[in-house]
Image: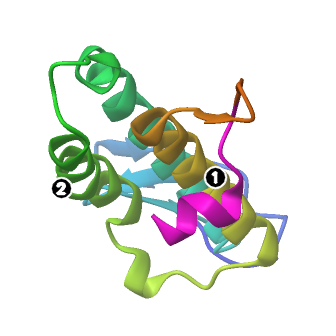
């Protein structure tokens, strides 16, 4: 991968008998690397992986047999870990932060479920989720 703003180098790199293809991004040690160092690509890849982890545990999250405390433990140890792997090195934009908080609220909505308010079921507000 060639890094930088120089658009003239689009050909592949040949060293001896080997030819290396130029790419715009690739995965290295579990992290997405791209030539413009755009971290939104990494955040989006992490969101996709966390959604896969969540849907892999969906039967457990829907189960009425499993307690909320166990579901919270599953979220904190399995899903959140996948979502935030390598986050120490991210420079987040407001949009990335917004996408991460939406993902977290979606999972917390599933864990805590709706509440009866005045004889009617309603979805918990974001403030209620954060207090829980």
Looking at the image, do the residues carrying marks 1 and 2 touch, with CB atoms under 8 Å apart? no
- Dot 2 lies on which element? helix
User: Residue at horizontal 46%, vertical 51%?
Assistant: 46
User: Residue at horizontal 22%, vertical 22%?
Assistant: 60
On screen, residue 52 versus residue 98, left or right, reads left
Residue 31, percent from left and from top: 38, 60
Residue 117, percent from left and from top: 70, 38
Residue 23, percent from left and from top: 58, 48
On screen, residue 8 versus residue 3, left or right, reads right
Q: Is residue 126 one of those drawn in magenta?
A: yes
**Of all residues shown, which one is farthest toward the front?**
118
Say which mark, if any, is on residue 1.
none
Q: Is residue 30 one of those drawn in magenta?
A: no
Q: Which residue is mark 1?
A: 24
Please give the range of residues in magenta: 122-132
Mark 1 vs mark 2, foreground winner is 2
User: Residue at horizontal 39%, vertical 51%?
Assistant: 27
On screen, residue 49 versus residue 93, left or right, reads left
**Which image quadrant: the C terminus?**
bottom left
User: In this rendering, is residue 111 above or below 26?
Assistant: above
Mark 1 residue crowding within 10 angstroms, few (<14) / some (14–19) / many (20+): few
Q: Quadrant of residue 7?
A: bottom right
- Dot 1 lies on which element? loop
Q: For residue 31, say whether it is visible.
A: yes
Residue 125, percent from left and from top: 71, 52
Q: Which residue is mark 2?
A: 77
Q: Earlier in the sequence, mark 1 or mark 2?
A: 1
Q: Quadrant of residue 98?
A: bottom right
Mark 2 residue crowding within 10 angstroms, few (<14) / some (14–19) / many (20+): few
């Amino acid at each position: 991968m060639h890094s930088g703003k120089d658009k003239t180098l689009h050909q592949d790199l040949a060293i001896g008998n080997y030819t290396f293809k130029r790419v715009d991004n690739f995965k290295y040690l579990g992290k997405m690397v791209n030539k413009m160092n755009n971290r939104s690509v990494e955040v989006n890849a992490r969101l996709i992986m966390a959604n896969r982890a969540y849907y892999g545990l969906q039967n457990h999250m829907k189960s009425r047999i499993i307690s909320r405390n166990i579901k919270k433990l599953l979220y904190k140890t399995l899903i959140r870990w996948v979502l935030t792997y390598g986050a120490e090195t991210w420079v987040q934009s407001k949009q990335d932060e917004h996408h991460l908080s939406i993902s977290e609220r979606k999972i917390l909505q599933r864990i805590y479920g709706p509440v009866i308010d005045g004889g009617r079921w309603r979805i918990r507000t974001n403030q209620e989720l954060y207090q829980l």
